[in-house]
Amino acid sequence: MALTPSAETLRRRVANRFFLALWMLAKLPSALFCGVRVDEFTDTVCVTSVPYGWRTQNPFRSTYFAAQAMAAELSTGALVLLAAEDAGVPFSTLILDVSATFGKKAVDRVKFTCNDGPAIFAAIREAKATGEARTVRVETVGRMANGAETSRFTLTWSVKPKG
């Protein structure tokens, strides 16, 4: 799908490590400190990652669940921001629910992949058309380089046009 020029600019900036670092410094300093980054970003998929290291490690020598949650939220939230920008009107967004399961100990960089861009864009379009809030439930899966699934997050976003 073709993005509006402003949405394409946002997509390019989020995908650019320098611009993302500046934005995180202003809006998400703890994610910047932990080393969360965006590895891939299109209108259908967002892949983020969080390193394993002293800034993200818990006492059990694995990546702390809160550091994983930051990367997981960003993989879905970036798509929500992109869809809202593409709609061309201001939106209020809110996470209504988060659930997570943890499968393997995260002892390497964990990449979170959210493939729910089409569902997010559909919810934003519907909210814009009706002027009413819509919810969208999205999933992001965290995997280490060896393919082991470390965690799976399900987030429910509420999106509503402002005004």
Image: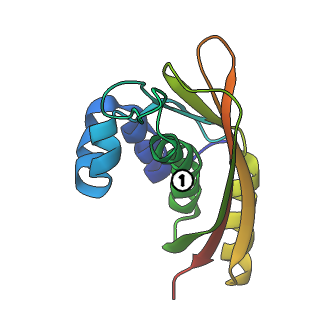
Q: Is residue 20 visible?
A: no
Q: Amino acid at mark 1?
A: Gly
Rendered residue at 31%/33% (across/down) = 55
Q: Is residue 131 left or right of residue 84?
A: right
Instruction: Give the x, y percent position of residue 26.
Output: 23, 55
In the picture provided, is 118 more to the left or to the right than 112?
A: right
- Residues 37 and 89: in front is 37
Q: Quadrant of residue 98?
A: bottom right
Locate residue 79, reporting x and y percent: 58, 49
Q: What sort of colour scheme is used for the picture?
A: rainbow
Residue at the image position 58 percent from the left and 36 percent from the top: 42
Q: Split into 4 quadrants, where in the image is the N terminus? A: top right
Residue at the spot x=42%, y=36% of the render? 58
| Foreground of the two, 67 or 117 | 67
For image coordinates 59% across by 13% down, the residue present is 145
- Return the residue nearer the eye: 124 or 22: 22
**Up-down: is 12 above or below 53?**
below
Which picture quadrant has residue 102? top right
What residue would you read off at disc 1? Answer: 77
Asked whether residue 103 appears in the rendered view, the answer is yes
Q: Residue 54, image x and y in percent?
A: 31, 28
State the SS at label 1: helix
